[in-house]
Amino acid sequence: MPSERYFIDADFLSQKHQELMGPEFHHLAHVMRTRKGDSIELVNGKGALAQGIVHDFSKDKARLHIEEVYQEPSAPCQLILAQAFSKQNRLDFIFEKGTELGVDHFWLFAGQHSAKKECYPSQIERMRAVTIAAMKQCGPLYLPTISFIPPIVEWAD
């Protein structure tokens, strides 16, 4: 696995161009200092891994040429982690390690002793960012889903 793997929430087509924007572009251009002609990998969280080459840069995006695409089949069984709300730094750790270990779905709920009973949109975005970072670093090609479910006491038998 190359050190340069980037996330794009889109489908990949072999021998086509794809644009990389936002934080992923910033990481490509300013952190990793990738140059025109360098090879990179792209993941979309839907089981696709694309090998690409940086075609050119503009001010806020990079244009990539997709060389080939590999589609990993989905697992025959799904791993679900049901987790009560906890402090944000603990949730970050749970989401990171869970993604690395192959969790397919995170179910969050308000526990009896949870300090908070819901998540704010910024916290949800942070959880998604943590799972994306773990997916890029560790190698799984499927991005886990994050769902909010009722407390356990409301679950049916």
Image: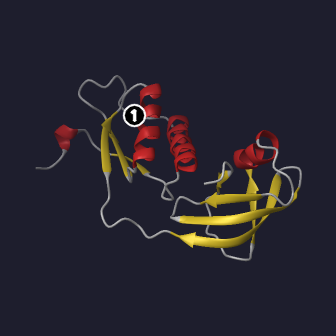
Residue drawn at 64 percent across, 66 percent down: 50
Based on the displayed image, in which of its 4 quarters is residue 126 positioned? top right
Q: Nearer the viewer, residue 119 or 4?
A: 4
Q: Nearer the viewer, residue 115 or 46?
A: 46
Say above or below: 56 vs 12.
above
**In the rendered image, which residue does mark 1 sit on?**
118
How many marks are shown on the rendered structure? Answer: 1
For disc 1, the neighbor class at 10 Å (few under 14, some 14 to 19, many from 20) is few
Can you name the residue that lies furthest to the left here? 157
Is label 1 in a helix, a strand or a loop? Answer: loop
- The N terminus appears in which quarter of the rendering? bottom right
* Residue 106 image point, x, y percent: 37, 46
Taking the image as shown, residue 13 lies to the left or right of residue 74, namely right
Colour treatment of the image:
secondary structure
Taking the image as shown, residue 106 lies to the left or right of residue 52, namely left
Task: Identify residue type, mark 1.
Answer: Glu
* Residue 49 image point, x, y percent: 59, 64
Q: Nearer the viewer, residue 141 or 90?
A: 141
Say above or below: 85 vs 125.
above
Residue drawn at 58 percent across, 49 percent down: 136
Residue drawn at 23 percent across, 28 percent down: 112
Based on the displayed image, in which of its 4 quarters is residue 129 positioned? top right
Taking the image as shown, residue 10 lies to the left or right of residue 119, namely right
* Residue 91 image point, x, y percent: 42, 32
Can you name the residue that lies furthest to the front here? 1
